[in-house]
């Protein structure tokens, strides 16, 4: 479409980049006249691609509700205290079981400090691997599969559609969690919208020459600097991070978190629809 309109030179093309990391991993063969991005961070790959069009930093519509709902009180989905482990889109059973075993053992040894507490494991809603052994949660004493995902906990999840109810549940789940554990996924951004403390789990891998995913993926370099995020690159370190998060009396610096997060996903307090309408008006008067 972009190539066609570039050729006939009769129409201007605005491309909405509705994915946070696509522009880091994909090259635009045909460049539009205008492009919208999540945050200033995305200008880095555009610069490498020598993008000559106009860039609009306007955030994303799919996280509008996160900003709208973040200051509202919501009933917890559970009758116990919890943290949530958000899995990535290409999970590995062996890797997951290593970190889950460490967490379960730590919680079991420190039951007096974690009374009525569980870790809730939430699979990625669009898992990329179709043939993978599932986690047996029966062997863990302090870890459960998120009940909302129970009926869809197969590795054919792309066949199931995300619904409005899923987003509402995710907001409630994140908002009421004591803290979040996440692989290198966009959940780190979503949790930061709610000012949640996050343990970003990114172990070193032979595949990356013994580096972490957050070291070889440019988009995560900014996120790793968020003041609410702690990096865990070794399963053996997870216990001390739990302890620090559980005992910390430090106040959350909301303005500071917003400052860092805004570079990755922009929000001005208004709805995405008003921001995109403003840019379309600008293009029409171009």
Image: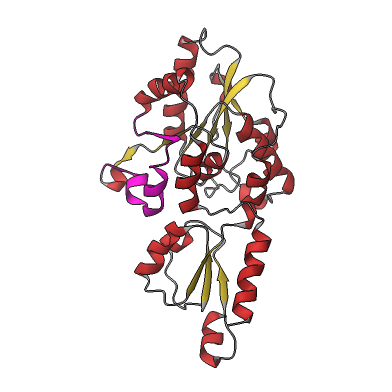
Q: Residue at x 48, y 19 (%)?
A: 246
Instruction: Provide residue 167's location: percent of width, then percent of height.
Output: 68, 44
User: Image quadrant of residue 12?
Assistant: bottom right
- Colour theme: secondary structure
Q: Residue at x 47, y 78 (%)?
A: 30
Q: Is residue 79 above or below residue 195?
A: above
Q: Which residues are magenta?
A: 210-234
Instruction: Provide residue 172's location: percent of width, then percent of height.
Output: 67, 35
Q: Is residue 271 left or right of residue 225?
A: right
Q: Residue at x 57, y 53 (%)?
A: 267
Exactly how many numbered labels are in the figure?
Answer: 0
Indicate whether residue 215 is drawn in magenta. yes
Residue in front for this viewpoint, 214 or 279 = 279
Instruction: Provide residue 264's location: percent of width, then percent of height.
Output: 47, 52
Kindly give the residue lying farthest to the front in the view shown: 255
Q: Is residue 60 above or below residue 30?
A: above
Q: Residue at x 47, y 35 (%)?
A: 93
Residue in front for this viewpoint, 200 or 236 = 200
Indicate whether residue 123 is drawn in magenta. no
Q: Is residue 106 visible?
A: yes
Kindly give the residue lying farthest to the top in the view shown: 112
Q: Which image quarter holds the C terminus?
A: bottom right
Q: Is residue 113 above or below residue 168?
A: above
Q: Which image quarter holds the N terminus?
A: bottom right
Instruction: Provide residue 146's location: percent of width, then percent of height.
Output: 63, 31
Residue in front for this viewpoint, 5 or 56 = 56
Q: Is residue 88 visible?
A: no
């Amino acid at each position: 479409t972009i190539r066609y309109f570039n050729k006939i030179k009769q129409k201007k093309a605005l491309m909405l980049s509705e994915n946070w990391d696509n522009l880091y991993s994909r090259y635009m063969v045909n460049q539009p006249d205008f492009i919208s991005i999540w945050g200033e961070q995305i200008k880095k790959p555009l610069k490498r691609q020598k993008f000559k069009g106009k860039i609009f930093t306007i955030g994303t519509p799919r996280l509008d509700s996160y900003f709208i709902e973040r200051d509202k009180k919501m009933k917890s989905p559970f009758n116990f205290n919890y943290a949530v482990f958000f899995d990535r889109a290409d999970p590995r059973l062996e890797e997951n079981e290593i970190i889950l075993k460490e967490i379960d053992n730590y919680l079991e040894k420190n039951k007096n400090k974690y009374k009525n507490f569980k870790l809730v494991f939430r699979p990625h809603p669009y898992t990329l691997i179709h043939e993978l052994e599932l986690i047996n949660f029966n062997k863990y004493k302090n870890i459960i599969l998120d009940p909302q995902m129970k009926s869809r906990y197969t590795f054919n999840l792309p066949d199931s559609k995300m619904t409005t109810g899923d987003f509402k549940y995710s907001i409630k789940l994140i908002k009421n969690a004591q803290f979040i554990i996440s692989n290198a996924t966009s959940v780190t951004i979503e949790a930061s919208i709610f000012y949640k403390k996050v343990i970003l789990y990114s172990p070193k891998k032979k595949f990356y020459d013994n580096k972490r995913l957050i070291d070889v993926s440019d988009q995560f370099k900014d996120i790793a600097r968020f003041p609410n995020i702690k990096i865990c690159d070794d399963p053996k370190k997870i216990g001390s991070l739990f302890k620090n998060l559980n005992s910390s009396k430090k106040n959350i610096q909301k303005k500071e978190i917003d400052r860092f997060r805004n570079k990755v996903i922009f929000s001005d307090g208004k709805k995405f629809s008003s921001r995109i309408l403003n840019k379309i008006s600008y293009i029409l008067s171009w």
